[in-house]
Amino acid sequence: MSNKLFQNVVQRMRGATERVLGVIDDMGVVVACSDDAMLGRELGVGVIEQMSTSDVFFADGYTYRSIGSGATSDSMIFVEGEDELARTLSEVLSVSFNTMKEFYDEKYDKTNFIKNVMLENILPGDIYTKSKELHFTADVPRVVILIRLLDRTEIFAYDIIQSLFPEKTKDFVVSVGDNDIALIKEVHSNIEIRDLEKLSGSIIDTLNGEFYTRATIGIGSIVTTLKDVSRSFKEAQIAIEVGKVFDVEKSIVSYSNLGIGRLIYYLPTTLCKMFLAEVFKKGSIESLDHETLFTIQKFFENNLNVSETSRKLFVHRNTLVYRLEKIRRLTGLDLKEFDDAIVFKVALMVRKYLLSNPTKF
């Protein structure tokens, strides 16, 4: 259990008694105390030896009591005095800390458990057995929201994200690598992707607003079984990778909205290269200059409408027709024809995908 939790309880007890009280670790160092001046000090030499042999004892004007069983305790309570009041106060603190420790350890175990499920570190057959041992609700709708930090402030970001989701038995925040933080969130069965995107937007706004930390978020699919949490996590990773290629202007990318980009991601690299070689067999894509590629992009954005595209580009209609004819001569594809336009659009996406060399999951 963290020293911060110990200190919070001790500080609250300070108003109830004038006795100095606190907690020492297994090295005899004061880690929490009602008297701040004692923090970091070491107590009597004989204290540490007695920690493993007795649950309560008296030494050097203090009453000591183990937190947990004496054999496995790694912390002890100390209260000023060796009288009955000191003994009673130590017992009250012991009950409080042990109750807190029980809930804290259970929460910690649950967090580790769901993290291991997400990372596929637990055999599928053991997932439900372990979930029963931890009294962990297994089959409820969950989604993995992956936050990838673009600035190295992972420690602060982790604390911020945890504070945004105080429901500790339903939402779990775990670190995954140096720059990734995963939120495994329990959701309603009728929640929609736009609701999750709105939630993700609030995370990004908070990170950026409080610590000037930029982030990209990938949202996996909503899953209804515990074993599928790992799939939602992989999908969130894929959403970020595909988004880096085809949706660079977006900071929030959902797996379910990846469109053709998701299809291309799953294609083998060799197949992608074969496709490009077939599409551009009459001329290399490298022969198209930047102006021509920009024209193609605008032509697609305006739904293959020549008049509208020429207006947006501030060029004469005949100039645009000439450029499209030039593309047809080089590639053999007439972009004014829907089928050819689709092939060319996909080919450009495949080329962009290959050049980006994304990570495969």
Image (cartoon, rainbow, N blue to C red):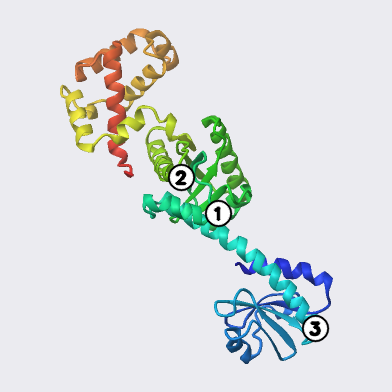
- Mark 3 lies on residue: 84
Q: Where does label 2 land, which residue?
A: 226
Q: Which mark is residue 75?
A: none
Q: Is residue 210 left or right of residue 219?
A: right
Q: Left or right: 316 with respect to 3?
A: left
Q: Is residue 35 visible?
A: no
In the visual, does 57 lie left or right of 179?
A: right
**Residue at image coords 38%, 40%:** 238
Which residue appears at 44% of the width and 50% of the height?
A: 128
Circle 2 sits in a helix, a strand or a loop, which is it? helix
Is disc 2 surrounded by few (<14), some (14 to 19) or many (20+) residues within 10 Å?
many
Earlier along the polypeptide chain: callout 2 or callout 1?
1
Q: Secondary structure at mark 1?
A: helix
| Pick the front one: 352 or 222 | 222
Amino acid type, callout 2: Leu
Residue 46 visible in the current orientation: yes
Q: Is label 1 or label 3 in front?
A: 3
Instruction: Report helix, strand or loop for mark 3.
Output: helix
> What distance separates the C-alpha of mark 1 from that of mark 3?
44 Å
- Local packing at callout 1 (Cα closer than 10 Å; few below 14, some 14-19, many 20+) is some
